[in-house]
Amino acid sequence: MALQKIVYFCHVWSLIELRRPLIRHKFEAWEFGPVLPYLYREFKNYDRAPIVGRARQIDPTDGKHRVVRYNFDSETESLLREITGFYCRLRVGDLVELSHAEGGPWHSVWNHRGNVNPGMKIDDAKIVEFYSKAARPFSIQ
């Protein structure tokens, strides 16, 4: 799912450029790449069709589903526009290749020579260590 890959790279570059995580949850190493399980569950019904809905969460006060609202500071919003503008133009195969780079965070967790288990987390420090060596594929204004 391209959405997962784009969100992953938004998180990657937030860690590097803003020196803070975009997402408080850890990505997991699944067979087809880095995944946020709750994001997967929310959008899996779209399969390969365009996503036309918004992420929802359960309101703890009444138990009803509500659209998730985000308020980003201007620095984060600007970075997200640059990142999504670049990565949304790539083919899914290119996104897979980038997120599965040999020696990268996903690759190291998934190919660890042990049993593959659900919930294998990708450490943010490993993300920063690997991707901070990469050239930025987009320009930051």
Image (cartoon, rainbow, N blue to C red):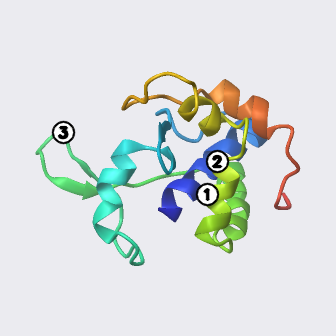
At mark 3, the secondary structure is: loop
* x then y, percent, for residue 121: 49, 28
Relative to 46, 61 lies left or right: left
The residues tagged by marks 3 and 1 sit, at their Cα atoms, a distance apart of: 36 Å
Residue farthest to the front? 113
Q: Disc 2, disc 1: CB below 8 Å?
A: yes
Residue drawn at x 60%, y 38% as measured from the top left: 106
Checking the image for residue 75, the label placed there is: none
The one nearer the camera, 50 or 19, is 50
Q: Name the residue under label 1.
A: 96
Residue 31, visible in the rendered structure: yes
Mark 2 surroundings within 10 Å by alpha-carbon count, few (fewer than 14), some (14 through 19), many (20 or more): some
Checking the image for residue 60, the label placed there is: 3
Residue drawn at x 43%, y 44% as measured from the top left: 36
Checking the image for residue 100, the label placed there is: 2
The one nearer the camera, 36 or 114, is 114
